[in-house]
Structures are given as structure tokens and as C-alpha cells.
Image (spheres, rainbow, N blue to C red):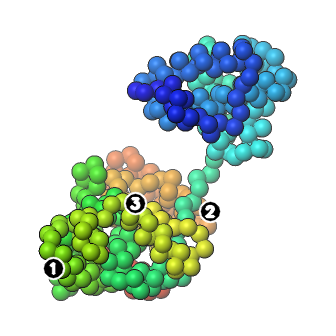
Amino acid sequence: MAGIAGALEVGELERSRRRPRSVWACELLERFRQYLDGRADFANNTLETYYERISDMLAWLENTQDHPGALNDPAARDRAVAAYRDHLLEQRSAATAKLALAAIDTFYRWRGLGPAAVARVKVRPARPRTLDNDEQRDLLRAAADHGPREDAMVRVLLHNGLTVSQVHLLNADFLQLTDNGGHLHVHSLDGQVRTAVLAASTREALRRWLVERRAILRRSGRRRRALFISRDGRDSRLIAPSIDRIIRDLGREAGVTERISPGTLRYTFDTRMLECGVDPALVAAAMGLTRPNATRVRTVLDPQDPVAAAAIAEALAFVAHGGAARSPVLPVRPEPVSEQLTFPLNGR
């Protein structure tokens, strides 16, 4: 493990807003850094973040001077940590305060005093950016205007919840199309493979792209396995940053007010299924997950639909304890407003 020292040399910690200036605080911070460098059970990012949080707290203690004994006395520790927590909640965010408390717990364990006895910070999971129906239609129109490649790429992201790396890894021979159906073998970076059933509109977009792809390869005189290639055939496979840039550019051209990414389309697929009452176990399977994401489900359905959220929670609890997934009884929801937004899970 490279540790924090190397990060300091390249300025990784310049993000820290405040640093202690007194000799005692700097020496204490240095000893804490050495302790963190020896923690093989923490990732480097965690160690760097913990260092930043304690650096900020020590600087705050210097400036306030209202908490003598905060580093040595348990009662003074608790008062100081509670005040610092409130300071972070007022000046920054609940997420920052929650992370700082985790770092402070580690710091005081190292000091031999143990974690502070203060109320923990609860952070409501942020709902990831998703596209509403109008934005989905506008994005699909913009993609179609650019040509079959963009159209097909947006549809496999939006209608099947692929990640950008999974789109990057797609090969043409992973695609199976018939007169009445079609599916795509999706490979992940960890070696897992799943089968994604394709909606009719996605199949048609892929057929159009395959025709253009063959013409590109014929002109270039090259042979490529990758499903998505450059328009001149020189690039054997579109890399993830290129796919990301294409989606972001299409979002701007579609007039989507907030920036989007391939992840936005994946979350839109996820959200659309959950909001339409699809069993979380089926949502997980359709996205290539081994189990439902409980936090994600709560974020989507709570508090806007308490009845559905309660039913989903029961199904999740059952799955979490090793039982077969149960289909929750959900309120009837409207069908998607366009065939372009459907997501068949049974191959029909």
C-alpha cells in the first residue's frame, strides 16, 4: 500500500479546507498519519479522507479554543465532537458530518479514548439523476438523428440497464436476433455474463446499426469483433470515455437541462421498473445484480408511495434471509406511455 505519504507528495490532500498550524496539532496529525499508513484493512482513499477530516477537526479545535481537554478527557471529547458535528451540519452537509464522525471514531480509538458518545448523523440516500418520459423521448430522437450507432447504443443503455463498461465489452457475436425476438449476452469486467432480453425497438435499432457496421468494415478492410466501433472502422472498440462523451453530447443536444451520463440511463431503467411495480428480484436480475439493492428501492419508492414501499420491503426482507423471492402486491401503475420505453423480461 502506497499510504498517505505519497499522496501528500503529489498534492492529493490540497482538497482539505483547513490545516492545523500549531506545533502540537501538526505533530499529532503526523503521528495519526503514520498510524493510518499502517492500516492495511483500509483502502488508500479511506485513509486519505480520514486524514483530511482529522486535519480539519484539529484546525477547528485550534480556532475555537472552547474545548480544552478534548483530546484527552472523555467528557470534553464528547462535547467537542458534538460541537464539531453541529458545525459541519451548519457549514457543509450531513454526508460530510457522517464521514467525519467515522474518521473521528478511528482517531479516538487510536488515542485510547474510544468513540465519542454523540448522536450519529443520518443521511437520506440521494436519488440518482434519472430521465422522465419526455427526456427519454428527446434523447432517443437526438440519438436517432445521429445515426444507427448512437440510436442502438442509447437503447441498450436505457432499455436494458447496461453499464458503460458492459457496452464497451460488447461483441457483435454476443447479439442474437430472430424474427420474433432477440437477446444480448452482457459481459462484466468481473467475468460475469448475463442475458439481456431486447425490446422490439432495441432490436430494430441494432439491426440498422449492424447494416451500417458491415458497410464501415467493408470500406476499411478491417475485421472487428466489437459491436460498437468508430465510424471509420479504425478503432476496434469504442472505449468507455468515448461512450460516456457520446451520451453526454446527446443529452446536451436533446435539451436535457441537467448533465447526463451512461449511469443516468442505467438508473432510469432501474427506476422505471421499480415504479411500475416489477419485483425487486427481477429488477436485480435484469441489471445483472445478485440481489436487490435495498437502499436503491427505498430511495425510489419512499416516501412517494408508502404502500408499495412496504410491500417491497417485505419482499426484500424475505430475499435477504435466503428465501425465494416473493412478488409483492403492489398498487396498479400505468403502463409506459410508449413502446420505446418497454422492457420485456420474459422474452415475449
First in sequence, mark 2 or 3: give its number: 3
- For badge 3, the amino acid type reads Pro
Question: Where is residue 269 shown, x and y percent of the image?
Answer: 43, 69
- For badge 1, the amino acid type reads Arg
Q: Eyeballing the image, is 322 above or below 111?
A: below
Q: Is residue 199 visible?
A: no
User: Nearer the viewer's eye, disc 3 or disc 1?
Assistant: 1
Residue 227: which quarter of the image?
bottom left
Describe the element under mark 2 as helix, strand or loop.
loop
Residue 241's tag is 3
Residue 200: which quarter of the image?
bottom left
Question: Where is residue 13 shown, x and y percent of the image?
Answer: 59, 34
Name the residue carrying label 2.
303
The answer to whether residue 205 is left or right of residue 335 is left
User: Between marks 1 and 2, how big is the CA–CA gap?
Assistant: 54 Å
Residue 160: which quarter of the image?
bottom left
Identify the residue at horizontal 45%, vertical 33% (top origin): 43
First in sequence, mark 1 or 2: give its number: 1
Identify the residue at horizontal 29%, vertical 52% (top origin): 189
Describe the element under mark 3 as helix, strand or loop.
helix
Q: Alpha-carbon neighbours of circle 3 within 10 Å: few (<14), some, or many (≥20)?
A: few
- For badge 2, the amino acid type reads Pro
Q: Is residue 20 visible?
A: yes
Describe the element under mark 1 as helix, strand or loop.
helix
Identify the residue at horizontal 31%, vertical 65% (top origin): 238
Identify the residue at horizontal 33%, vertical 60% (top origin): 239
For this rendering, which residue is in front, 180 or 60? Answer: 60
The answer to whether residue 184 is left or right of residue 66 is left
Residue 218's tag is 1
User: Between marks 3 and 1, how big is the CA–CA gap?
Assistant: 26 Å
Q: Eyeballing the image, is 283 above or below 118?
A: below
